[in-house]
Image (spheres, rainbow, N blue to C red):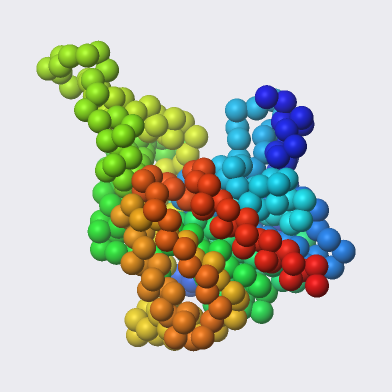
Amino acid sequence: MDVTADKHSVGLVAPHTARFDESLRLKSGAAIGGYELVYEIYGKLNADRSNAVLVCHALNASHHAAGRYAGDPDNVGWWDNMIGPGKPLDTNRFCVIGVNNLGGCFGSTGPQSINPATGRAWGADFPVVTVEDWVNTQARLADHLGIRRFAAVMGGSLGAMQALSWTIQYPERIGHALVIACAPNLSAQNIAFNEVARQAIITDPEFHDGHYYEHNTKPARGLRVARMVGHITYLSDDEMASKFGRQLRHGKLNYSFDAEFEIESYLRHQSHKFSDYFDANTYLRITKALDYFDPAAEHGGNLTLALEPATASFLIVSFTTDWRFSPERSREIIKALLDNRRDVTYAEIDAPHGHDAFLLDDARYHRLVASYYDRIGKEIAV
């Protein structure tokens, strides 16, 4: 389809790059002397720059949240169903910004970038980054763009953790937080899944202690297994049963170790695609950022105290079949916010898709988000 003829698409888009030469102190105590962030913008800033919305990405996504690239029409933004003219996040009203996080593998400075101290790719020497570090870099990008305050910061999953962290780190710079399919920290089970994925990568013979670029190779097998593990956790049992059941690819058992069931074939296909475009060192760091996120940890485990600085209004959304970030975890955030007498809107969507529901088309979910942004738009208009 010609995206320029689609009135609900942002159309053809192009990334931008911002360079930051001032040293950035990371939560780990390490510092990075200079870095670049790749970002995209959809819609236009209004006169007082009060209509800016930051969209934070989850594990395997990037700055490319909406639209398509010229010459690559199949490369659709990962939240294209959410962002665009007349869509829930309406670019006729809001200026939407997507950023590839520091440590990423889609143009922002990360393990594949050249370390100026050595003249070689950073590889395993690239520092571990956290959600809080990402929020700090996003604030610097906002300064670069002349945005004093975001009308809203929005994200799902790991992106929602960033939106939540914004309300704590920069409460004066955010009006609303849309926190979707989130948890205030990872459960032991979630950390375990991440560790299995990391071990698949680290034990791949082609990993070379993280310096595989120098060997002109990559730990593709480990990355594929990591993706399979992750993908299983993003879907509900009902969704898997509905999509695949016990369907056989060739209608009969072959008594082999080939992909005989449709679910096996699907996982292998998805994992091969993923290993073609994603970087293993980035995967390691992003899963660690997930593990480390725990704003209550610095307050003796008291989430109410952790969220006390927040002044934003909140939309919190969970999905009934999301067993990775269950509705119970969202309710922990809600209780802490209500303890602080904050303005909270909550919806628990009965959806069969599991954790991936935040990315999919659900009319109730999209109407809710559209209604909430309508509220924000009216505040800006005033």
Left-right relation of 43 to 1 = right
The answer to whether residue 267 is seen in the rendering is no
**Which residue of the protein is positioned furthest toward the left in this rendering?**
255
Where is 143 relative to 338, above or below? above
**Measured from the top left, where is residue 82 in percent x and y?**
60, 47
Left-right relation of 279 to 254 = right
Give residue 141's quadrant in the image: bottom right
**Measured from the top left, where is residue 63 in percent x and y?**
62, 48
- The quadrant of the image that shows the N terminus is top right
Residue occupying image coordinates x 50% and y 46%: 362
Left-right relation of 49 to 111 = right
The answer to whether residue 296 is seen in the rendering is yes
How many labels sit on residues?
0
Give residue 70's quadrant in the image: top right
**Measured from the top left, where is residue 216 in percent x and y?**
46, 31
Residue occupying image coordinates x 81% and y 58%: 45
**Measured from the top left, where is residue 266 in percent x and y?**
34, 28
Residue occupying image coordinates x 49% and y 86%: 340
Where is 90 relative to 262, above or below? below
Nearer the observer, 238 or 304: 238
- The quadrant of the image that shows the C terminus is bottom right
Nearer the observer, 214 or 262: 262
**Which residue of the protein is positioned furthest toward the right in this rendering?**
47
Left-right relation of 217 to 45 = left
Nearer the observer, 379 or 102: 379
Residue occupying image coordinates x 47% and y 39%: 278
Where is 152 relative to 120, above or below? below
Nearer the observer, 165 or 23: 165
